[in-house]
Amino acid sequence: MTIKALSGNEAVAQAMRQIDPVVVAAYPITPQTEIVQLFSGFVSDGLVRTEFVPVESEHSALSAVVGAAVAGVRAMTATSSNGLALMYEVLHIAAGLRLPIVMPVVTRALSAPINIHCDHSDVMGARDSGWIILFSENAQEAYDNVLQAVRIGEHADVRLPVMVALDGFVLSHGVERVSLLEDAAVEAFIGEYQPTVDVLGDEPVTVGALALQDSFFEFRRQMAEGLYHAPRVIEEVGREFEGISGRPYGLVEAYRTEDARAVLVALGSTAGSAKEAVDLAREEGLRVGLVKVRAIRPFPAAALRELLGGCEVVGVLDRSLDYSGQGGALYTEVKAALHPLEGRPRARGFVYGLGGREIGMEDLVGLMRELVPSGADVTYLGVRE
Amino acid sequence: MYSLKELSKRPELFEAGHRACAGCGFPQAVRLVLKATEHPVVVAVATGCLEVTSTVFPYTSWNCSFVHNAFENVAATISGIEAAHSALPRYGKDVGPRHFIAFGGDGASYDIGLQSLSGALERGHRFLYVCYDNGAYANTGVQRSGATPRGAGTTTTPPGRFLDGKPQRRKDLTAIIAAHGIPYVAQAAISNWRDLVRKARRALDTDGPSFLNILTPCRLIWGTAPEETVDLVRHAVNSCFWPLFEVVDGRWKLNYKPKRRQSYVDWLRRQRRFAHLFDGRHDDLLAELEAEVEAAWRQLLERCGEVDDKS
C-alpha cells in the first residue's frame, strides 16, 4: 500500500490505470476532464495497454464502450453532467445488453443556467437506467468504489454496468490522503474478465436483436433480477475488499445511530461533513446520527428500514430537485422505503447545495438542532427566497 | 475479377429468410459486400429497415457476428469493437484478422449519425462504412431525409397546394466523406454488381477507414414495382443522378461513363414520389432538377479529370 496526496480525479485515474481496461473511450467535460487527461498520459507512457479512443462526444464515448464490451473486453469511460445527459439513450442499451461497464461520474449541475459545479441532478436523472450506482464520500472511496465496481458489475448474478459518483470539485479537485493498493493486489482482486458475449469469437453471434411483444418483457424482467441480486453482491465484494484494504464497504454506513432520536440521511461528500456535525451536535446533548447511502441503485430500502425504524425523525439531504413537488429524489425514496413500517418515523426533506452552493458545518449543526418531527415536509437550505 | 459463378460459391453471410419487402434493394447490397470478405466479419448495423428485418428475436439472418446498438452511433460502436481488436494482442490475445463493416441507411448516415461517422473516420479506425441510400426514412414510414432528392413527395414533404415535394436539394454525402481525406471512398450501385464487389474488396483491403455509398431502391419510398428495382438503379446510374466513382488516396476516378445517357426526367417519371411533377404545370421545376443533375455530373467529371463529351 502507498499513501499519496491525490485529488479525486487522480485517485480515479489511478484506479483505471490499475484496472488496465482494454478500451477507454472518453470525451472531456468539466469537472471530469482531468481523468481523461491523466489516463491519456498513462497510454502515452505505456503504463497501460489500453486502446484509448478519443471520441467526438459523450454519446459516442458510451457507444464505443458498448462496442468494446460486446467484443468481450473490459471497457470504461467517465463523464459529468450534460455529458451524462447526452449518453442517456445508450445508458439503457448498456444495461439492456447486460454489459458490465464501469463509469466514474463526476457530479455536476445540469444546464440551464449553465453551471460547472457540484450537485446530483445528473446522476439522479439517470438513476433508473438499469445501472448500479455507488456514491463516494471522499477520494479514497472514489478509488475503492471504482475497483469494487468492476467485480460487482461482472458478477455472474448481476452482469450490469456500474456508475461511481464522486462530487464535482469538492472531491474531484480537492486533494486528500489516499491509500493506493499495490498494482498486483488490484490485479488479483479484479481477476481475469469472463465475458458472456464476444463478437470477436469464432462463433457468429447476434447482439442487440429486435425483441417484440413476445420477448421484450422477459429480457427486462431478467435485467431487473440482475439488479435485485446486486445488494448481496455489493456486500460480498465489500467484505472481500475489506480483507485486502482494511476498509469496510456495504450498501449504507451508519454513524452514531444506535440511540439517535433524529437521523440525517446523506450522499457523497456531504456525508463526511455530516459525521463531524453529528459529533458537534452530540456535544450539545442532541441525540442525532447519520446514515450515509452508498448504493442508490438498487435502493437499500431494507437496510434503511432497519437503521431508521426506531428513531423519531429522519432528515433527508438532497443535492438535487425532484420536480414532482415532493422534495428531492432521495427523500421521496426514503419515504417509500419507510412506508411499510408501523409507527414509522416522520421523514423531512432538505434540498441544498444546487450548482455548487456550499453547505457549512454550521448549516448542518443548525439543521440538527431544528430536526424535530413537527417541521415542514420540504425545506430549501441556503437559498435566497 | 469475380464471376457470378464464383460469387455464388462464396459463403452466404446474409441469409434468406429476412423480412425485407419483395423488391427491396439493400439485401442485394449487403450480400454483395459480404461476398467480398475473406476473414471472419463483425457487422454493426444502425437502427433501420436492415436491422429490424434481419434480427427479429429469436431469429437472425446473419451468419457472421452482428451488433445493433442504436440509430446514430453505428460508427462509434464499430470503432469500439475495432479498438478492442487492435488492443487485444497487447494483452496476449490475438484473435486473428477480422473485417469490421458498419451498415447504415441514409437517415443513419446523412442525418442523425453523421457526427459519429465523421468522428470515426477522422480517428482512422480500420473499418468499412456502407451507406445503403434509399432516399428517405423508410422504417418509420417514408419521411424526408438529407438524401431525399429535391421534388420528391414524402410523408413529411407531401405535395400540396403550397409544396411541390421536398424543396431542398440532397446533400452530397460521398463528397463530404471524401473531404475527410480517408484512404478509400466510392459510390456504387446494385445494378453494377461487379463494380460493387470490386469496390467492397478494395475497401476491405484498406488499412484505415473506407466508405461505400450504395443506391438501393425502396418500393415504398419510390413508389415502384418490385421487379423494377435493379432497372431503376441502372437508370439512375445512366442518367448520371448516381455516378459510379471512387476516391483513392484523394484522387477522384470515374468508373463508368454511360454510352447512351438516359433521361433524368424519365427516371423521375417512373416513380410515384415524383408523380405530382408531371401534371403539366411543373415543367420549369423539372428543367431545374435536370440542370442540377447535369451540373453535379460536370463537377464530378472535372474532379475526375474527365473531358465532358458535350462540351
Image (cartoon, helix red, strand yellow):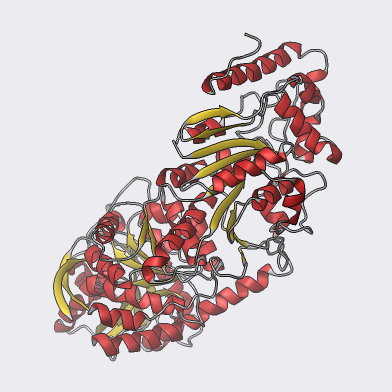
Q: Relative to A346, is B297 above or below?
A: above
Residue A158 position in % (x across, y down): 50, 79
Q: Quadrant of residue B186?
A: top right
- The residue under the point 47% across, 51% down is B126
| Front-lying residue, A63 or A371 | A63
User: In the picture, residue A350 is in which quadrant?
Assistant: bottom left
Residue at 59% across, 41% down = B212
Residue A160 on image: x %, y %: 49, 73
Please say whether residue A42 is visible from this viewpoint.
yes
**Horizontal side, residue A375 vs residue B59: left or right:** left
Q: Give left or right: position of B283 versus B196.
A: right
Q: Quadrant of the N terminus of chain B?
A: top right
Residue at the image point whose x is 25% and y is 82% from the top = A288
Q: Nearest the camera: A141 or A314? A: A141
Quadrant the C terminus of chain B occupies:
top right
A314 above or below B79?
below
Q: Write down the quadrant of residue A321 in the picture.
A: bottom left
State the image coordinates of residue B39 (x, y, percent, origin top left): 58, 59
Q: Is residue A129 visible from the viewing direction of this image? A: no
Q: Is residue B50 above or below residue A21?
A: above
Residue A228 point in image, percent of width and height: 52, 80
Foreground: B17 or A263? B17
Q: Residue at x 34, y 88 (%)?
A: A240
**For the view shown, which residue lies furthest in the top direction?**
B311
